[in-house]
Amino acid sequence: MAFGINRRELSRWKHQIDQGEIAFLTHYWLDDRFPESKSVTKVGCSDLAKLAAWGNKYGLQKEWIHVRKDGYSHFDLIGKRQIEILQSENIPYMLK
């Protein structure tokens, strides 16, 4: 279950994806499969080759991309790796 983002943040993420940019969206998230994680970062791009190349820098496999029919395909980052990647990308991680 996702929560903690507003329509403006979601629209900005989608716009960046539509422009072929690597876009980041972090929000609170609860999933019983990952009880230690309280947030997820979705990293998306409309150019799947570009997204796969970005993920490869961090050891993410292209098979892990959530390919979506609506065009908002993305990687999901959670846990320690999420924070490490956000820090490497100079993106503040402010969720607790």
Image (spheres, rainbow, N blue to C red):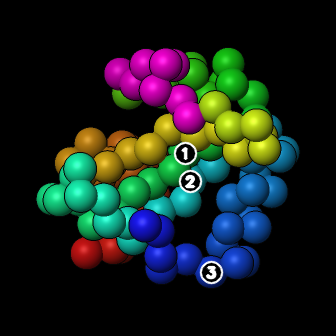
**Distance of label 2 from label 3 (alpha carbons):** 14 Å
Which three-letter amino acid code belongs to the residue tagged 1? Val
Query: Which of pointers 2 and 3 indicates the residue nearer the eye?
Result: 3
Q: Along the horizontal axis of the image, is 80 left or right of 2?
A: left
- Which residue was labeled with disc 2? 24
Q: Secondary structure at mark 2?
A: strand
Q: x, y percentage for residue 63? A: 49, 19
Q: Quadrant of residue 30?
A: bottom left
Q: Name above or below for residue 94 compared with residue 56.
A: below
Q: Is residue 71 magenta?
A: no
Q: Is residue 61 magenta?
A: yes
Point out the image quarter for the N terminus: bottom left
Q: Name above or below for residue 69 compared with residue 91.
A: above
Q: x, y percentage for residue 35? A: 17, 59
Point out the image quarter for the C terminus: bottom left
Disc with the residue nearer the chain's start (2 vs 3): 3
Q: Secondary structure at mark 3?
A: loop
Q: x, y percentage for residue 67? A: 64, 31
- Which residue was labeled with disc 1? 43
The secondary structure that dominates the magenta segment is loop
The answer to which of 12 and 33 lies nearer the viewer is 33
Q: Which residues are magenta?
A: 59-66
Disc with the residue nearer the chain's start (1 vs 3): 3
- Which residue was labeled with disc 3? 6
Q: Quadrant of residue 32?
A: bottom left
Q: Name above or below for residue 37 compared with residue 84.
A: below
Which three-letter amino acid code belongs to the residue tagged 3? Asn
Whether residue 45 is visible, yes or no, is no
